[in-house]
Image (cartoon, rainbow, N blue to C red):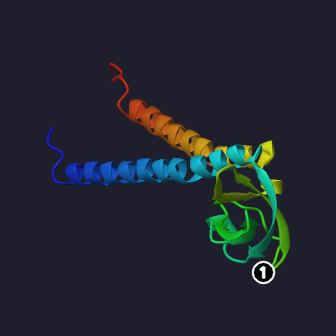
Amino acid sequence: MNTGQGRPRRVRAATIAGLLVVTLVAVTYVVFLPAAWQRVEARGGTPASAAFHDGACLLGGCGVTFSVAGERVTAGLPIGTRAGEHTDGDTVAVRHVPGEPGRAVLAGDTGRGSVAALLAVPLGATLAVLAAGTVRLARRERRAGPVQPS
């Protein structure tokens, strides 16, 4: 059975779409897992009082400046920082990883709920892709089911 030129095009489109989906899921792991891990590491970290610098906090664009051993340190806050109520110049409580003051987290973002929310994003993306793949396979099997004798 010759499917003509339509079949290779569909296969290429499906392959490209599959690669894009896998790439997007991989990017969610690369972005969200380190942000969650940084919050876990900072739980037992050194507390400090810092000046908040406004930016796109959900995308990791905001930061804080604080003093460590008499030196001023500016640290970028990780992706997913919940700082909606803070404005530029506010004093905020932060925790930083011992020995690495450049890796700071707002003290309120070190809780289990914050970490769980960050881990839910890649997990949800993975489950959505697996569900879509299962539905696609089920539809394909239904179409290619056994031929009923007449």
Q: Is residue 141 visible?
A: yes
Residue displayed at 60% across by 41% down = 123
Locate residue 135, reporting x and y percent. 50, 37
| Quadrant for the N terminus in the image | top left
Q: Residue furthest top?
A: 149
- Does residue 19 appear to the left or right of 105 in the view shown? left
Q: Which quarter of the figure has residue 91?
A: bottom right
Residue displayed at 55% across by 54% down = 31
Count of numbered badges drawn on the protein: 1
Q: Which quarter of the figure has residue 137?
A: top left
Task: Give the residue pinned by disc 1.
Answer: 88
Above or below, 71 relative to 144? below
50 or 57, which is in the foreground? 50
Locate residue 46, reporting x and y percent. 77, 51
18 or 116, which is in the foreground? 116
How crowded pointer 1 is (Cα within 10 Å; few <14, some 14-19, many 20+) is rated as few
Locate residue 53, reporting x and y percent. 72, 76
Q: Residue furthest front?
A: 70
- Does residue 61 appear to the left or right of 67 in the view shown? left
Q: Residue furthest bottom?
A: 88
- Badge 1 marks a residue whose secondary structure is loop
Q: Amino acid at mark 1?
A: Asp
| Quadrant for the C terminus in the image | top left
Locate residue 60, reporting x and y percent. 63, 66
Q: Is residue 85 visible?
A: no
126 or 44, which is in the foreground? 44
Residue displayed at 23% across by 49% down = 7
Above or below, 90 relative to 47? below
Residue displayed at 67% across by 63% down = 77
